[in-house]
Amino acid sequence: MTNLVANSGACLEIYGASDDSQHAYFGGRIRDEQSFILMALVSKDTPTYAQQIYVIRDALVAPFQTHATLGNAGSVFHAQIKPRTGMYLDVRRNEQWLRGFRIQLLTMQEWQVPMPPGVIS
């Protein structure tokens, strides 16, 4: 991994954080939520390399500031950055200190199951 950030490169690590799927109401509404930790890493070998984390942060955050409605049966997909999870930090990988930016991404999908049959448990 550290060879990916050498010479001004960057790396993105993605970890699953939580997962939940619930029947919200009798009659067929289902809500599926997952969250992921995204951590961008850059080298600290030079100040110029380390400062790239701010540009990478902006590029990482922008796509998750919107949501979209899917075209099937009222299903809604939503992704957002979980509030107060953005953090700059120093991270050690393979005996090397790197500069990182970490956020938690929350995704939700919700849909209504047609009646009948509704949700069958």
Image (cartoon, rainbow, N blue to C red):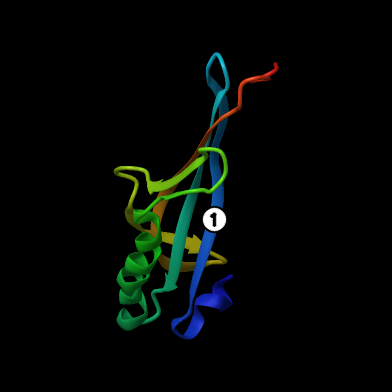
Residue pushed farthest front?
Answer: 116
Q: Which residue is mark 1?
A: 14
Q: Secondary structure at mark 1?
A: strand
Going 56% across and 50% down the picture, which residue do you hit? 15
Q: Quadrant of the N terminus?
A: bottom right
Q: What residue is at 53 percent from the left and 48 percent from the top? A: 71
In the rendered image, residue 83, in percent from the top left (x then y), is placed at 31, 42
For residue 115, which quarter of the picture?
A: top right
Q: Quadrant of residue 98?
A: bottom left
Query: In this orientation, which residue lies closer to the viewer: 89 or 29?
Result: 29
Query: Hey, what amino acid is under mark 1?
Result: Ile
Residue 97, image x, y percentages? 44, 67
Q: Is residue 110 left or right of residue 48?
A: right
Mark 1 neighbour density, 10 Å: few (under 14) some (14–19) many (20 or more): few
Seen from the viewer's position, the closer of residues 29 and 8 is 29
- Extreme top residue here? 26
Residue positioned 36% across, 54% down in the render? 66
Q: Residue at x 47, y 86 (%)?
A: 7
Residue 63 x, y percent position in the rendering: 40, 61
Q: Describe residue 12's horizontal placement relative to residue 100 as left or right.
A: right
